[in-house]
Image (cartoon, helix red, strand yellow):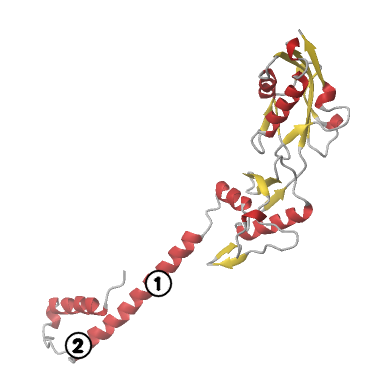
Amino acid sequence: MARTVNEIQAAIIADVQADSTLSGLTSTSKRAIWRVWTFIVAVAIAVLEQLMDKFKSDNETIVSLAPPQTTAWLSDKIFKFQYDATDPQVLQLIDLVPQYPTVDATKRIVTRVSVKTNLAGSVTIKVAKNEPPEPLDNLELDALQSYVNQIAVTGIDYSVTSTASDKLKVEAQVYYNGGYSAVISDNVIAAINNFLATLPFDGSMQLTDLEAAIRAVTGVNDVIFNNVVARQDSDSIADGTFLVTGNQYVGRKWPTVSGYIVPETTTGHTLADTLTFIPE
């Protein structure tokens, strides 16, 4: 903290009086030349200290407002992205920070986000909107990419993606207590849908967890997977990845490509088509 002119001058005078070579400077008059010089020097030092305090304060303000650029910070910022099809949401530099001049939570469209960094230092960001999740359209995605580029660190490549859900074909035999025949199909399909919907975004679907979800349905005694195929939306079923083929487990889990996964939607391959219920 900057000292006052009087504090600085008093310190200079004390140094002068402690120096034997300056013992002749004994006048107490404020107009004595040597005291005038101590005052002038004290004023200069006080101004310098005040400038240093201001510089320190400004830098501390900048640092306190600077983004930490952690994964959690970036995820939070993406959740706060605003979009309006008729009213462009444009960032402005306010107090050295890019932010919206008007914060409107009703314009936030991102409901799921995943931020990952690869070995090359590039950052991949996957997002989805709404619940159940669905991809952002091209205009929304372009706006989000621009938003990320403005808030992120210069020199790092940020790639924002939002694609249609992965698909999971489940061909299985479900053995159940015959007393539940009126509801077993709907309940099992609902359980699979719920299981996939509650997976962590950009996580993996594990067969053991899928089996547990089915077996947890009241009335189910057992389940045998005949064929289980996972695929990203752009692939056909034939190009998908088999986790189970011909009752043989060949894969343990499916790391989602889009970040989320739903039961196969292709006609003839939906859960209603591929699940066989066997009473016992």
Q: Nearer the viewer, residue 133 or 168?
A: 133
Label 1 sits on a secondary structure element that is helix
The numbered mark at residue 54 is 1
Q: Nearer the viewer, residue 111 or 186?
A: 186
Residue located beneath label 2 in the image = 34
* Mark found first going from the N terminus, 2 or 1: 2
The tally of labels here is: 2
Q: Nearer the viewer, residue 71 or 223?
A: 223
Determine whether, in the image, residue 184 is placed left or right of residue 106. right
Q: Percent from the top left, x then y, of residue 228?
A: 78, 24
Q: Nearer the viewer, residue 280 or 2?
A: 280
Q: Residues within 10 Å of mark 1 (few under 14, many from 20)?
A: some
* 87 up-or-down from 33: above or below: above
Question: Which quarter of the figure has residue 38?
Answer: bottom left
Give the quadrant of the N terminus: bottom left
Give the quadrant of the C terminus: top right
The numbered mark at residue 279 is none
Q: Residue at x 13, y 76 (%)?
A: 18
* 36 up-or-down from 142: above or below: below
Q: Residues within 10 Å of mark 2 (few under 14, many from 20)?
A: some
| Residue 232 shows in this picture | yes
Q: Residue at x 73, y 40 (%)?
A: 258
Amino acid type for the residue under numbered disc 1? Lys
Determine whether, in the image, residue 93 is placed left or right of residue 43. right
Q: Residue at x 82, y 24 (%)?
A: 272
Label 2 sits on a secondary structure element that is helix
Amino acid type for the residue under numbered disc 2? Trp
| Residue 154 shows in this picture | no
Q: Percent from the top left, x then y, of residue 113?
A: 65, 45
Q: Percent from the top left, x then y, of residue 183?
A: 75, 20
* 261 up-or-down from 80: above or below: above
Question: Which quarter of the figure has residue 206?
Answer: top right
